[in-house]
Image (tube, coloured by chain):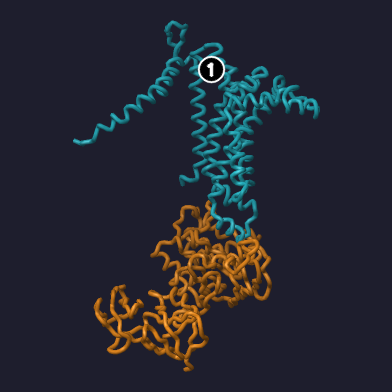
Chain colours: A orange, B cyan
Amino acid sequence: MAQIKLSNLKHSYMPTPKGPDDYALKEIDVTWRDGGAYALLGPSGCGKSTLLNIISGLLTPSEGQILFDDRDVTALPPDQRNIAQVFQFPVIYDTMTVGENLAFPLKNRGVDAATIKRRVDEIAEMLDVTELLKTRASGLSPDNKQKISMGRGLVRDDVNAVMFDEPLTVIDPHLKWKLRSKLKELHQRVKATMIYVTHDQTEALTFADEVVVMQDGEVVQIGTPVELFERPQHTFVGHFIGSPGMNVLPCEARGDRAVFEGHEVMLEGPTHGDGGRTDLGIRPEYVGFGDTGIPAHVTKVSDIGRHYVVSAMVGNTALKAVTEHSVPEPGSQVFLQFKPEQSRVYRDGWIASEERAQ
Amino acid sequence: MRTENQKAWFFVLPVLALVAFNALVPMMTVVNYSVQETFGNNQFFWEGLGWFEQILRSDRFQAALGRQFLFTFLILLIEVPLGIIVALSMPRKGFWVPVCLVLMALPMLIPWNVVGSMWNIFTLPKIGLLGYFLNDVLGINYDMTQQPLSAWITVVIMDVWHWTSLVVLLCYAGLVSIPDAYYQAAKIDGASPWSVFRYIQLPKMKTVLTIAVLLRFMDSFNIYTEPFVLTGGGPGNSTTLLSIDLVKIALGQFDLGPAAAMSLIYFAITLLVSWVFYTLMTKDDAQ
């Protein structure tokens, strides 16, 4: 187990990268504490798998360093880094039994038979596969196969980190939830640093203590699930996390107020900087209805079970609001109220309003 | 009463007639000849299983069968491991992939009798490039027209040259279908190159390898043209394989009864061994 530190990490798949666009990863600086559960969240092609492969040693970064407990491992091959990785599609040694699969990483490292047996039994018990130990691994269901791949990572008690590359992709929806809670439970038992790559916000937010949101090879925000939801540092985070995502509305910034479609909106605090494109960001959850406020025209109401999503037009701008009761009729005229402490201004995508001192 | 549509039979009929005409009827003719003696003029005398007994007891058949098994055994022993090794060392991506694939496919595109003639000219002592080089430059006494051992080596090498590519291409197809994650997982698990081969590559190649072994067995067991063109079964009878012997009996001596019996025995052996191979190699999957 170890603390993982990435310093000034850059990677390009081209031999001679020219501009920043040639980099799959642009300047990453992150420190992950020992024993934490982290998620790398971002859309396909944002560089999260590249980052994972760099940490595991399957790729060597073009620039920068990877430190495990202050030891530089940038040039070390995967088997000397003592990490484990679980892939998108379960990797199973078909000709071996479940038990032999679990024992394989230990056998390759010359561990004695008694220790192997003890560790395999322990891990099998943790994963609830004890009764499968003697069966051939090739006939297992996808979720059991994925469990075995995880087990192969956890069986070594000296692993620095366990990495998951979208491990639930091929698992049936009703088993996803089960496997996810198993993972969470495993993390609490083995206390290894775990890094989980996914493009699914539910998976990331339920698994991780801290989520790293990535876009176009850059880290956009690092924070706890609550932080990401409550105070997105970038419109991308606001939009990517949450369902529906944050409303991003073109506006004009004036001190601690924003002017949106001719209406003044109170912000969380004063804005800084100038120039660039300014947007008002507010989550649908914080848009309420009242007797006064910004006049809007309701275009659509969707019942999504727990609550309703109301689509409305203010002038020529569309926005969404979430409400649990007092649902307006489509076509009706309503007044919207934006919660001031949840209304922020973003300049060129990045947050530009300051949190008011409490 | 079931009301099934009997019209379907009319559509199958043309194919049935065609198959009967080109397969069943000739096959039955062979069966017919194998149990009778004929002196021409369409006069037949019942022989029973006499020909079968005679063939099976004859030293000549047993010797040819022995040579045939030895040949096929050597072919499989060389071509299968060699094919796997070549497939493993071929590039998986990049510019050289199509180049390698075309080079591999070339020998298989050459007609059998051309391969025989090529190797004949290539290995003739004094005239042939290889024959001249071995005898007059290296001083090795090599003459495939006179020495049984030289003839055998030449016939085997010729088949290896012609058909190893088939094993290579089939194995290669199996290898490229292995996802990268397997190799990455093996790296992380600390697997040695041998373990990667034993537990990842070989299991993934198994299906295609079964097909490769079966095809190479059937082809080499029934081989005729190449050794016939190269050595004509000689020197003496040293490279007279089953098919060459069969043609000698049927067309050389015109002993139609024994030849027919021998054909059926030959066919039965090929079928039996193929079946045994297939059952053994797919045994694990059935569990």
* Residue at 29 percent of width and 73 percent of height: A302
Give the image location of residue A240, x and y in percent. Answer: 44, 73
Q: In front: B75, or A15?
A: A15
* Residue at 46 percent of width and 16 percent of height: B34
Chain letter of mark 1 equals B
Give the image location of residue A10, x and y in percent. Answer: 62, 69
Say whether residue B62 is left or right of residue A286: right
For residue B153, what is the image quadrant?
top right
For residue A304, what is the image quadrant?
bottom left
Looking at the image, residue B247 lies above or below residue A171: above
Q: Is mark 1 on a helix, strand or loop?
A: helix
Mark 1 closeness class: few <14, some 14–19, many ≥20 residues within 10 Å: some
Q: In front: B88, or A81?
A: B88
Give the image location of residue A164, x and y in percent. Answer: 53, 66
**Is residue A8 visible from the viewing direction of this image?**
yes
Q: Residue furthest left?
A: B1
Say whether residue B3 is left or right of residue B61: left
**Is residue A187 visible from the viewing direction of this image?**
no
Looking at the image, residue B275 lies above or below residue A50: above
Q: In which quarter of the image is the N terminus of chain A?
A: bottom right
* Residue at 60 percent of width and 50 percent of height: B94
Q: Which residue lies furthest to the bottom in this view?
A: A358
Amino acid, disc 1: Ile
Looking at the image, residue B134 lies above or below residue A95: above
Q: How many labels does the image show?
A: 1
Q: Name the residue under label 1.
A: B55
Give the image location of residue B130, x and y in percent. Answer: 73, 28
